Structures are given as C-alpha cells and as structure tokens.
Image: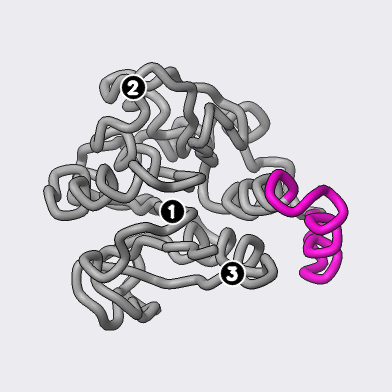
C-alpha cells in the first residue's frame, strides 16, 4: 500500500506528521512525501522542512492521499499543477484524505461536491463555496473521502482510518505505542469550549483571505 503525503510551501507540520505517524505504521505500507519538485519543503513558520522524496509526476497511483493544510490554502487552491494531480490520483485511490485546510484543496479540485466535510473551524464557511456540506465534526467520512478538522485532529483521522483498514485492535495498538492519551491542560480546543473573547480575538487576527497566517497574540 502506497501512502502519498502532499507537501507544499507553508504547509502545517503536524497536519502531515500526525497521519504519517499513525497510518505510516500499517504493515507493508510505503509512505512517500511528494511535492511539485523533490527536495526540502518549508513549513508555515519556515523553521522546519520535510523532504519530498518524489515529484508529483513520479507518484501516479497511490492507495491513500493525505493533503495537509496550512495558513495560506488559497495559494495551492489556485495551483493547477497540484489540483490536476489531485484529480488524477483520486481516480484510483482507495482513500483520499485531508487535514485542516487541506479540505479546501480537495474542494478546489472538485472532489468534495455534494459531500460532507470538515476543516479548521476558521475556514468551515469556505466549504460551501467549494460544493461541500460543512460539519463541525472532528473526523468526517463520506465514501472514500476522509476530512479532519484543525491540525491535531489529523492524529484522530489517522487512527480512525487505520481502524477501518487494519481493524480496531491494530489501531488500538498503534494508539498505545504512540501513547496518544490526550489530557490537555486547558479546555479550549474548540470554539465551542474556548472563552468567547478568545474566539473573537482569533477570528479578528486570522480572517481567511487577509493574507496573514494564523497568529497568537498575548502575554505570558
């Protein structure tokens, strides 16, 4: 089974690494990081790079595609090379997946028309413009399309899909070995739980289309 993780400039690291570190534990799975051109690809803060082993033209029939998100999805949503590749490989994938704003790339490629999907909470209202039905669920299955909400939910998506593919016990074993046992210090991981003032501040600082990536302001 070949798993292709799409990389592009300014992707969010955990969006790619979460599914990689769960689905990548499938027996006999080959994980390949792909981009327009092979080589290092920088994450959204520029401090980290992952290496794309192959160019898009070298990966034509992956079984699973993982599309991470980033703070500037509009850049790749207007990239015909990436969109054409997504359409081409989707014709033969078993599963086409995304994390965070990666679902907007799938939508821009026309792959989510009439389908339920999720994304980062700041971008959910963009999905109807791309033909999708937005839902605030953390992981959404609609046929072979699996979309995850913001950033950390890619781990949940990877484990859930792992259970579908290899069985619940296998997924549980991976969860145990990665010691994925979330006990966050704050109960502010969704706009429904976070203080209203914080939610509004983040909306004001990170409105989609403003050209600025997600930022956090405040003092210690």
Viewer-proximal residue among 48 and 54: 54
Residue at position x 65%, y 47% in the image: 161
Residue 68 x %, y %:
42, 54
Which is in the foreground here, disc 2 or disc 3? 3
Viewer-proximal residue among 93 and 86: 93
Label 2 or label 3, whichever comes before in sequence order: 3
Drawn side of residue 39 relative to residue 190, left or right: left
Span colored in magenta: 163-182
User: So how many labels did they put on this image?
Assistant: 3
Q: Which residue is under mark 2?
A: 113
Q: Is residue 216 above or below residue 9?
A: above
Q: Quadrant of the C terminus?
A: bottom right
Secondary structure under tag 1 reads strand
Q: Which residue is under mark 3?
A: 29
Within 10 angstroms of label 2, few (less than 14), some, or many (20 or more) residues?
some
Picture quadrant where residue 60 is located: bottom left
**In the image, which disc is placed on residue 65?**
1
Label 1 or label 3, whichever comes before in sequence order: 3
Residue 97 appears in the picture as rendered: no
Residue 17 x %, y %:
53, 66
Residue at position x 63%, y 53% in the image: 158
Q: CA distance from mark 2 to mark 3?
A: 29 Å
């Amino acid at each position: 089974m070949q798993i292709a993780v799409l990389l592009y400039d300014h992707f969010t690291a955990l969006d790619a690494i979460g599914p990689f570190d769960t689905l990548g534990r499938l027996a006999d799975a080959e994980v390949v990081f792909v981009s327009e051109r092979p080589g290092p690809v920088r994450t959204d803060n520029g401090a980290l790079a992952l290496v794309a082993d192959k160019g898009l033209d070298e990966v034509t029939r992956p079984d699973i595609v993982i599309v991470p998100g980033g703070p500037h999805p509009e850049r790749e949503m207007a990239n015909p090379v990436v969109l054409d590749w997504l359409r081409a490989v989707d014709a033969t994938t078993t599963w086409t997946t995304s994390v965070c704003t990666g679902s907007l790339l799938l939508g821009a490629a026309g792959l989510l028309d009439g389908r339920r999907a999720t994304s980062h909470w700041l971008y959910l209202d963009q999905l109807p413009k791309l033909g999708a039905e937005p839902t605030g669920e953390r992981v959404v299955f609609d046929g072979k399309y699996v979309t995850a909400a913001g950033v950390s939910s890619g781990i949940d998506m990877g484990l859930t899909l792992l259970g579908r593919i290899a069985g619940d016990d296998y997924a549980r074993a991976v969860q145990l070995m990665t010691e994925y046992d979330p006990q966050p210090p704050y109960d502010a991981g969704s706009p429904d739980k976070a203080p209203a003032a914080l939610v509004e501040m983040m909306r004001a600082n990170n409105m989609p289309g403003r050209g600025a990536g997600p930022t956090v302001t405040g003092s210690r």
